[in-house]
Image (tube, rainbow, N blue to C red):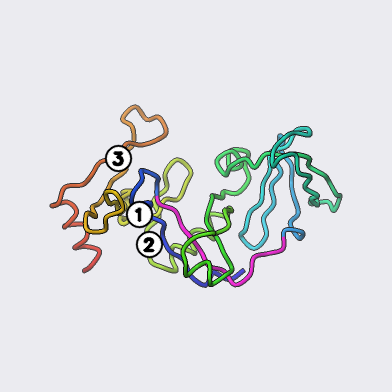
Amino acid sequence: MFIMDAKVEWHKQFSNVPGLKILVDKMPDYKEFRYIEKNGIYYAENEGLVSFYYYQSPGEGFAGREFHITMEDGSEKILKGPWSSNSNAVNRMGFGPCQEISITEEEECWNRGYTFFASAVTHELYRKSAELIGVHLVEWDGYLVPSLCEDRVIKYSCRFGNPKDEYLTEYIRYEDGKKGWNTKRLSVEESVEILGILNS
């Protein structure tokens, strides 16, 4: 799987942290994935693309759909109604590390900017994607967050989708050390300074 291009989804109108979108030449066939199970987490990786499920017994995840997967030892297993889980839970189990990403192998999708495939990749592939476009990544609570700065999480924002009212937002950790963040709008002076460094 070759990364052809990448870009940042800044989520300018929202408080969501930025994420990456990537265009690849061809995604691996999910039939070729080989899964490992630990405490109900089924995890597999192929060429940097990651797949995982949470499954203890037949359930209603994915509307009860059956997933036929192949384990690392070659045995077949059917997961009926598993749940999708998330990279944070997977990483806590010792897999990965990995995280969510938007991905496509269709140039038409890439050009229009939506209908990407929601997936997850290894941190190694995530870093390669960011390096391709020269964007900084800041480690934050186990995630790699695209940022305008090397050591602070700063992104573009705008009010009501108006590009003429664009400004910079910084994510600030809670003072008591708990996970999560607050956001603050940077002053004009701070924004000018940061943008000046970026454009120098």
Q: What residue span does the magenta drawing correspond to? A: 18-29
Q: Residue furthest left?
A: 189
Residue type, numbered disc 1:
Ser
Q: Residue 168 in magenta?
A: no
Q: Where's residue 1, x and y in %?
A: 62, 68
Q: Amino acid at mark 2?
A: Val
| Closer-to-camera residue (124/156) | 156
> Quick check: 119 left or right of 76?
left
Q: Amino acid at mark 3?
A: Thr
Q: Position of residue 72 (x, y in %)?
A: 79, 51
Residue 159 percent across, percent down from the top left: 26, 49
- CA–CA distance in space, label 1 to label 3: 14 Å
Question: Who's the residue at 69% across and 52% down the image?
Answer: 44
Crowd around label 3: few <14 · some 14–19 · many ≥20 (10 Å): some
Q: Say which mark, if any, is on residue 147.
A: 1
Callout count: 3
Disc 3 from disc 2: Cα separation? 20 Å
- Residue at the far top in the pictured view: 176
User: Residue 59 is drawn in which quadrant?
Assistant: top right
Residue 21 magenta-highlighted = yes
86 with respect to 137 (left or right): right
Mark 2 vs mark 1: which is more N-terminal?
2
Mark 1 or mark 3, which is nearer to you? Answer: 3
Counting residues from the start of the chain, the first of labels 3 and 2 encountered is: 2
The label shown at residue 183 is 3
Which residue corresponds to mark 2?
Answer: 135
Residue name at image x 82 percent, y 44 percent: 78
* Mark 1 Cα shell of 10 Å, populated few (<14), some (14-19), many (≥20): many
Closest to the observer, 127 or 167: 167
Q: Residue at x 52, y 57 (%)?
A: 102
